[in-house]
Amino acid sequence: MAEVKTKKTYYWGTGRRKTAVARVRLAEGTGQISINGRSLEDYFTEEKDRQAVVAPLELCDMRRRFDVFVNVKGGGFTGQSGAICQGVARALKEYFGPVDAAAAESTPEGESSPPALVKKLRDSGYLTRDGRMKERKKYGKKGARKSFQFSKR
């Protein structure tokens, strides 16, 4: 008898930081994280970058529940880790989905409801984009703000 494959459900999220853009897919799984086809430990050498990637999952206690697949391009390592962090948070928000107020009230006291987890993500700053970008170079100047030495004569 042929084995029937069940189609996986993916939850998508896009994250941006400086010039880095990350496309994140979450699927039910064992907690593997794949970034551009490489593992988290292979891709990011700095511990702070690794922590940034898993922080939204840790906040919602879903670190071992989802497999994370990421395609990221542009920027540097820190910008990419920030973009992945926002993408994971947005994918988690999509996973929790739009929930009405009646369902939120019927949740038992000890259990966190999806709206509470989305609020927790937002309050922690994972759903907010960091809009700081590199300032462009201006004409007649050495950089964005630095000028050449002024000579009166």
Image: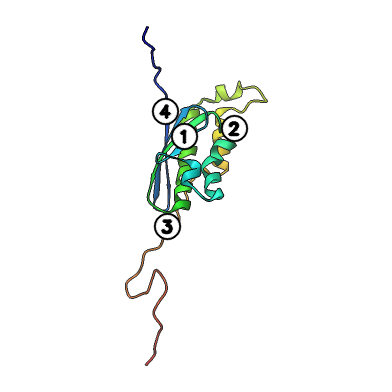
Secondary element under disc 1, as helix, strand or loop, is strand
Between disc 3 and disc 1, the foreground one is 1
Whether pointer 1 and pointer 4 mark residues with C-beta atoms closer than 8 Å, the reply is no
Query: Which is more N-terminal, label 2 or label 4?
Result: 4
Report the front residue among 92 and 54. Answer: 54
Q: Give the number of the mark in front: 1 or 2.
A: 1
What's the CA distance linking mark 4 and mark 3?
31 Å
Q: Residue at x 41, y 60 (%)?
A: 134
Secondary element at tag 2? loop
Q: Is residue 125 visible?
A: no
Q: For this rendering, which residue is in front, 127 or 86?
A: 86
Q: CA distance from mark 4 to mark 2?
A: 18 Å
Quarter of the image where the N terminus is located = top left
The label nearer to you, 1 versus 4, is 1
- Residue located beneath label 2 in the image: 61
User: Where, by quadrant of the figure, is residue 12 drawn?
Assistant: top left
Which residue corresponds to mark 4?
10
Lower position in the chain sequence, tag 1 or tag 4: 4
Left or right: 12 as drawn, with respect to 123: left
Residue underneath mark 1: 68
Disc on the earlier residue, 4 or 3:
4
Image depth: mark 4 or mark 3 in front: 4
Callout in the foreground (2, 3) = 2
Instruction: Please indicate whether residue 106 sits to the left or right of residue 2 in the image.
Output: right
Real-space CA distance between mark 2 and mark 3, rounded to the nearest whole angstrom: 32 Å
- In space, the residues marked 1 and 2 are separated at their CA atoms by 14 Å
For the residue marked with disc 2, what is the amino acid? Asp
Task: Identify the residue at image location x=48%, y=31%.
Answer: 67
Residue 48, horizontal then vertical, whole percent: 55, 49
Could you tell me the amino acid type at mark 4? Tyr
